Amino acid sequence: MLEQNLQKYFNFADFRPGQREIVEAITSGKDTVALMPTGGGKSLCYQLPAIIFPGLTVVVSPLIALMKDQVDALSARGIAATFINSSINSAEVGRRVADIKSGRTKILYIAPERLGAPGFQKFFSELKVDFLAVDEAHCVSQWGHDFRPDYLNIKNHIKNLKRRPIVAAFTATATPEVKDDIITRLELREPAVFVRGFDRPNLKFLVQCDLKPKERYAEILRIVKSLDGSGVVYALTRKETEIIAGYLQENGVKTAAYHAGMEAARREKIQNDFMENNFQVIVATIAFGMGVDKSDVRYVIHSGMPGSLEGYYQEAGRAGRDGEKAYCVLLHSKKDTNTHKFFIRANHNDMLGQGKSWQEASRISDIKYDRLDKIMRYATERKCRRKMILEYFSDPEVKNHSGNCRGCDVCLGWKRNTEQHRSGRSDTGKGFITETVKETVKLYQDGYDVFRIAKMRGLGVSTVMGHLIEWYEAGGELAIEDLVSSLEQSQILEAIAKVGMERLSPIKSVLLEEISYEKIKLVAAKIRRGR
């Protein structure tokens, strides 16, 4: 039955490793804690039970962007989902509340702060909730890197419900002490605990140490120009995001900086443009990515070492969520360590100013120093990077690890300036169709249009078009007229007659702006196939 629902609602034939047992635990009525990395498929582990349960599911999430992306994707799949947060006005809140009361809504996404709003508490307490999922559950723990006090009250809101639902907590970044804190602070009842999926074979982990700033910028440029597709570069400060973005732009790379100092509307536009592949690279602080559901990021580069291995893996894990090969590159400098030590000292003083005792503030600082030490070891020791990650997160799969993953710089014997991989077709062979392309094709064959496929899969429309073009060029059957109108085909053919079809840029330059490169590629492929 689980596989039938998986196929029916998500078009997947099989679960990813670790997913099935989590879904089984929840649907059998057990409270659950699931520690799964970014890209490990944790959202399906609460969405599928939500569909199976007869009543309402509530998902508590701090990420407004993620709420919208997931609700859009669920709606595209025919699942009645909605969200209530600060991005919608009071009239729209009223309409959504009415839908929830009437039973028309299956899944409700809500922020923890909304649960505490006086006008909302009474409404929430009267709901009949079958299942409550707490996403980003590390936020409940003072030992987590993103502690949010409103999460502490979730247990009280659960108690106010007429009947206690099944409760599950999900996080991508939890150490053993954080996991225990989650169980205690959410008052979970004998939960099933799963640590799964931290071994993602499609990710390649590469590290370079002791780079000077100019060397680091030059290496970012070299990597970006040697890889196909879009990527994210993380920097430690807002100033550095602007410097790196400017450097890449000067060298011909379509790039945007992104950080919390920008206006919300500007950040949203950059996110949307990145989703549609209008930028090749986003250079960002850790403010970017939380809730941005783009599955075809081909590389994540850290220009600077994060303060913990869990923070690093959450950000690096945004690469390759479609299951295709992707690269996670850490460019380390000696000054990174001093920067984080400064942050820890400043945070220690802030805690004292907020009334914490010296002992309590020192205890938290000691944990942060310990985490900093562990990521320093990850960056500097010549050991299998993947095995170090599995050991850190206590993933059971580590017992099966040989010590040679064949997918990190240590195990590959990779040296600086010798890696020249490309993530496109160069290593796949002519006519080879990847699983992520096959998934897009399956949805197209099931009758979905490119816009709905993009929503369902968390991809840009141009990426979906690219998948269909690749399939068509490999011999697949594609109704070109569904994607390029007869008038547009005529205009493209006229342009090709004038300038030839050796290069796309000259063709594009004589066409209307709304005729995309993807449409040109389709018509060119049609010509090559003699249609």
Image (cartoon, rainbow, N blue to C red):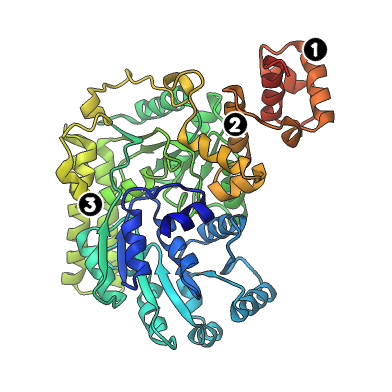
Q: Is residue 134 visible?
A: yes
- Disc 1 vs disc 2: Cβ atoms closer than 8 Å? no
Depth check: 135 or 313 in front?
135
At x 71%, y 32%, the residue is: 479
Q: Which residue does the numbered mark 1 point to in the structure image? A: 497
SS at mark 3 in the image:
loop
- Say which amino acid is labelled 1: Ala
Rendered image quadrant of residue 326: top left
Q: Which residue does the numbered mark 3 point to in the structure image? A: 393
Rendered image quadrant of residue 3: bottom left
- Say which amino acid is labelled 2: Gly
Q: Is residue 147 above or below residue 163?
A: above
- Gap between marks 2 and 3 measured at Cα: 36 Å
SS at mark 1 in the image:
helix
Mark toward the start of the polypeptide (3 vs 1): 3
At x 59%, y 23%, the residue is: 475
SS at mark 2 in the image:
helix
Label 3: few (<14), some (14–19) or many (≥20) C-alpha neighbours in 10 Å? many
Mark toward the start of the polypeptide (2 vs 3): 3
Q: Is residue 222 above or below residue 187?
A: above
Q: Which residue does the numbered mark 2 point to in the structure image? A: 466
- Residue 90 horizontal/vertical position (percent): 66, 76
Label 2: few (<14), some (14–19) or many (≥20) C-alpha neighbours in 10 Å? some
Q: Is residue 146 visible?
A: no
